Image: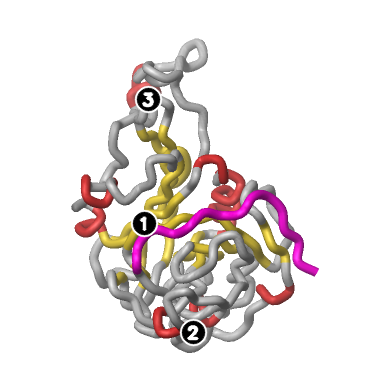
Amino acid sequence: MPVRKGAPALLSAGTLCAALLLTGCAGPAPSAPVPSSSPAAGDGRPAPGPPGVVADDLASAPVPTPRIPGIGPATHALVPDGSTQVLVATGATADSNRATVTLYRRDRAGRWTEAAGPWAAHNALQGWTDDHTAGDLRSPIGVFRIGDAGGLLPDPGSRLPYDQDEEFDISGTGLSGEPLEGSFDHVIAIDYNRIPGRTPLDKERPLGEEKGGGVWIHVDHGGPTQACIALDREALRELLRALDPAADPVVVMGPKNVLAR
């Protein structure tokens, strides 16, 4: 029986698409789609290190900035004002199916600091698109809220609502012939073409079936996805524990040149 906890997620941002549920994320055939401690407000210096800390250690500490690194003004404007956690998933080119994922946190002074990651990841086989349609094998570009999680395995300590359900079980092979078993042990739903506040398994598609759905952040199976973002298992578990519904978290996803606008 599903196990749910926490508060409902918020509405997604953007008008993009993704692959169908289960098969849309990592199914065997194409189908439709941190916090770390921060300096006190007003203090831009790194937190004091332990006795004997060397200058190089302080120099390598994350430096708060007024804008998320790599995110340009047009993209930054799409981040909700109330969001203080932003997950950035970016690829080198529009056709790349490998990505880098980093979680950023905003302090009370409005400065952004790297909070977790960066982690290597996979995205869709054909890369990215700003006009996703079901089965195009591309991940949607945009800014989307993330507020609901689940998986085949028990909750690893998520503060997001978490639905443990046997329906997250998956078998078969991915687009490169790799086994898909375990890919949905843990997932985070990306609020594209879905109703926020529901289990990631929910199949209602407000934009229509042709726009896909079931775009998740899930366990990496070692190859490209249908439309989802796939992270190493331990990285995903760390991310689940870091995301805070009170921070109104969003994911900013797409190729570097688009996100830099």
Region of the chain picked out in magenta, as a range: 1-15
Amino acid on which the number 2 mark rests in the picture: Gly
Q: At 45% across and 15% down in the image, what residue appears?
A: 48
The answer to whether residue 215 is left or right of residue 6 is left
Q: Nearer the viewer, mark 1 or mark 2?
A: 1
Q: Nearer the viewer, residue 54 or 230?
A: 230
The answer to whether residue 75 is left or right of residue 160 is left
From the image, tell me which residue sits under label 1: 143
Q: Looking at the image, is 63 positioned above or below residue 118?
A: above
Image marks 1 and 2: residues in contact by CB distance under 8 Å: no
Rendering coords of residue 32 (x, y %): 44, 83
Residue 67: name its quadrant. Answer: top left
All told, the count of numbered labels is 3
**Of the numbered discs in the image, which one, if any, rests on residue 109?**
3
Image marks 3 and 2: residues in contact by CB distance under 8 Å: no
Q: At 64% across and 46% down in the image, what residue appears?
A: 159
Q: Nearer the viewer, mark 3 or mark 2?
A: 3
Indicate which disc, 3 or 1, sits on the residue closer to the N terminus: 3
Q: Is residue 13 part of the magenta span, yes or no?
A: yes
Crowding near the residue tagged with mark 3, few <14, some 14–19, many ≥20 C-alpha atoms within 10 Å: some
Q: Is residue 147 part of the magenta span, yes or no?
A: no
Amino acid on which the number 3 mark rests in the picture: Ala
**Quadrant containing the N terminus in the rendered view:** bottom right
Q: Looking at the image, is 250 positioned above or below residue 201?
A: above
**Of the numbered discs in the image, which one, if any, rests on residue 177?**
2
Tag 1 secondary structure:
strand
Q: At 51% across and 15% down in the image, what residue appears?
A: 50
